Image (cartoon, helix red, strand yellow):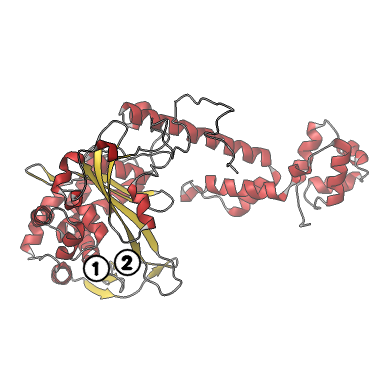
Amino acid sequence: MKKAFMGVRLKRLREERGLTQVALARALELSASYLNQLEQNQRPLTVPVLLKLNAVFGVDVQRFSEDDEARLITDLRELLGEQPEHDAITLAEIRELAANMPAVARTLLRLAKNQRASHEREEAWAARLGLDRSELGAAKPMPFEEVRDFFYTRHNHIAELDELAERLAGAWLIRPGEAAEALEKRLEHAHGVRVVRSAWQDSGTEVQRRFDTVQKILTLSPHLTNGQAAFQMATQVAFLEASPQIDSITMQARLSSDEARRLARIGLANYFASALILPYGQFLEQAEQLRYDIELLGRAFGVEFETTCHRLSTLQRPEARGVPFFFVRVDRAGNISKRQSATDFHFSRIGGTCPLWNVYEAFAQPGRILTQLAAMPDERAYLWVARTVSRGYGGFGAASKTFSVGLGCDLRHAERLVYSKGLDLKDKGGFTPIGAGCKVCPRANCPQRAFPAVGSALLVDENQSRFSPYPAL
């Protein structure tokens, strides 16, 4: 048996029984000094002592189990790992808490669980009532959520940056698919910045872009395609030439923390970069001519599938609107790392998303474009296009990233898309019924429902097996 120092647990047991050290030592046939050493963690708790505790007091030895301690450590690491870096708690401190004060650890976990449940209920009711969570007094969002909400409220269209980028693209003679060379010249001639291709790692992860402000060297990963390299150079141009506009928009957003403001600046710089290499007028004209064929558009402008999808979700200039798209990027676990909407499509914030959505089916058919006619519980229908995208720069055995990218639009715009070809847009019976996530979806008879919606009545019937807490054999 591994040495187990569990003095606090032993002391708590003694206090619960109302015993002195001498009385407990006598009951366990130990010396008082030995028991004191056990309680002070100067000696490990041994198997014979555990067996004595069980025989004399009927104590469940699981109370002193290392497995129980390991589970507590795992749960505490997950909970405390969400805290800001300046409040970071070390693994050693977590182990000490789990080993010596398990009741305190369980209380912390229970409080956190109750808090999460409360936030989820608030989110669910806000979604049902069509309210912003701030209107219900919900907790302040995390910085990345706050920035994401900022873009969402702007319908993913930042007019000031779009117009500036389009003017500069014309002035610098940036041509579709040939932006990298023009941007490299601009950086060198206007800012004295030299662009080099060289691998650079930070904490074992390759960095795509690194700017040395002293030597004025922009280092780009050698594994980037021309389109990706152009995007990274355009992002650097944004920080050098569009900072006043970016700062002004960030201040207007009234974000609540410095971290959120930093994230907003990065997001706005990326927006500018996309608008610079994919100028609004040219890109919209090509998109209409090609009926929004994502692959053909990407080839025409020399950019990747995901970049094309993201740019398509921003084409909402009042005098020249494109199809209002929703853009989403998810991983296999259902985590939404990007979501933008040019309209009012509701992305779930809680409880995951719908497994019937084709963005998840795309993982089973990597690289293939899938289409789906989907109906939401409010009877609104959408056309969705989804495909996987992968990023991997290492050799054999190296880890890579795989996501599913989805692009959707309201059914009334579907005929403008090449992806509506062969689909019956009028047969609502053939539409896939999806929802925003089980916790807010009212579809009671969905075969994929994982748990009942928040706030709904759960009818328990011993003659039925729905929502069983244990897996069926």
Closer-to-camera residue (207/362): 362
> Which label number is shown at residue 229?
1
Q: Is residue 348 visible?
A: yes
Point 63% across, 39% down: residue: 106
The kind of residue tagged 1 is Ala
Q: Position of residue 66 (x, y in %)?
A: 71, 50
The kind of residue tagged 2 is Gln
Q: Is residue 442 above or below residue 313?
A: above
Q: Is residue 8 visible?
A: no
Closer-to-camera residue (208/308): 308
Q: Is residue 424 left or right of residue 134?
A: left
| Dot 2 crowding, Cα within 10 Å, few <14, some 14–19, many 20+ | some
Q: Is residue 356 left or right of residue 114?
A: left
Q: Quadrant of residue 347?
A: top left
Q: Is residue 186 left or right of residue 106?
A: left
For the residues bearing labels 1 and 2, Cβ distance under 8 angstroms = no
Asked which secondary structure carries label 2, the reply is loop
User: How many numbered markers are drawn?
Assistant: 2
Point 75% across, 44% down: residue: 62
Q: Is residue 465 above or below residue 86?
A: above
| Dot 1 crowding, Cα within 10 Å, few <14, some 14–19, many 20+ | many
Q: Residues under labels 1 and 2: Cα distance?
A: 9 Å
Closer-to-camera residue (128/188): 128
Query: On the image, numbered disc 2 is attached to which residue?
Result: 208
* Quadrant of the image containing the C terminus: top right
Mark 1 or mark 2: name the one nearer the start of the chain. Answer: 2
Point 62% across, 49% down: residue: 73
Q: Position of residue 256 (x, y in %)?
A: 33, 40
Point 38% across, 42% down: residue: 354
* Quadrant of the image containing the N terminus: bottom right
Q: Position of residue 454 (x, y in %)?
A: 44, 29
Asked which secondary structure carries label 1, the reply is helix
